Image (cartoon, rainbow, N blue to C red):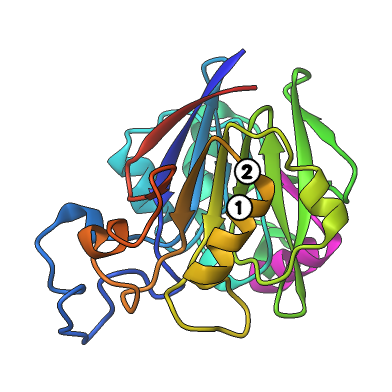
Amino acid sequence: MKGKAIFLGTGTSQGVPLIACNCHVCTSSDTRDKRLRSSLLLQINSLNYVIDTGPDFREQMLRLKIQDLESILFTHEHKDHIAGLDDVRAFNYKQQRPMKVYCTKEVEIAIQREFHYIFSAQSYPGIPKIDIQTINKEPFVLSDTIEIIPILVYHHKMPVFGYRIGNFAYITDAKTIGQEERDKLKGLNTLVINALHQYPHISHFNLEEALEFIADIQPKKAFLTHISHQFGTYEEIKKLLPPHVEVSFDGLEIEFEC
């Protein structure tokens, strides 16, 4: 079974360009240097699935003319990964059903806090309708056929889930990844991993750490995401990478086997 991954956004919590920044990256004319907040679209068996709905979710759906959405998977509860959830209303209306949302209990608590009106006893027409499916480290299945293997990583001290689907894996906002979780990633064709910039950061891999992780996992191909304007332009970053590692950009498409 073949699938396709489309990068909806590849930037940090502030995106690229940043507000009020005039650096050479933020003022670049290369469209690959325009990065919305990190998110991924999976297309499998003609169905669409999204990993994370950040503040740019509406724009991302419009940009790709997405007409239907089967479900949403969340990595963690930070605002740059959940803030756009309200816009599932359009899919609720068109599909006439609640949106299935797969997340940990910690993310569910954050959603209940940030979108309290969804859960209010005094509900009113037009609010988002969601159907939360609480997940843990155990594999689960989407649409009765697609096995998802959660990969537990840590964003400083915050637990975050990456996801493996067949020979493809997507991990963002990682700083620490234990050996048990690394073992779940062996045999990948394609790995997507965060690399914020070149110098150390308290809660994200920098370039050196991302490349060390890639060397440990040994995928056939790897792509860097969650990229800061401090990293450089697409062309500048590309020159720093070995042949089997690439810089992702918004709109990039990757095919994989489920």
Amino acid identity at mark 1: Ala
Q: Position of residue 253 (x, y in %)?
A: 38, 34
Residue at the (59%, 29%) spot, across then down = 96
Is 175 drawn above or below residue 93 in the view shown?
Answer: below
Asked whether the viewer can see residue 121, the reply is no
Is 52 drawn above or below residue 90 in the view shown?
Answer: below
Q: Position of residue 257 (x, y in %)?
A: 60, 20
Amino acid identity at mark 2: Gln
Identify the residue under disc 1.
215
Towards the viewer: 37 or 200: 200
Label 2: few (<14), some (14–19) or many (≥20) C-alpha neighbours in 10 Å? some
Question: Per the image, is 111 magenta?
Answer: yes
Magenta-colored span:
101-115
**Which mark is on residue 55?**
none
Q: Main secondary structure of the magenta part?
A: helix
Residue at the (64%, 29%) spot, across then down = 167
Identify the residue under disc 2.
218
Residue at the (40%, 59%) spot, across then down = 56
Residue at the (74%, 39%) spot, across then down = 186
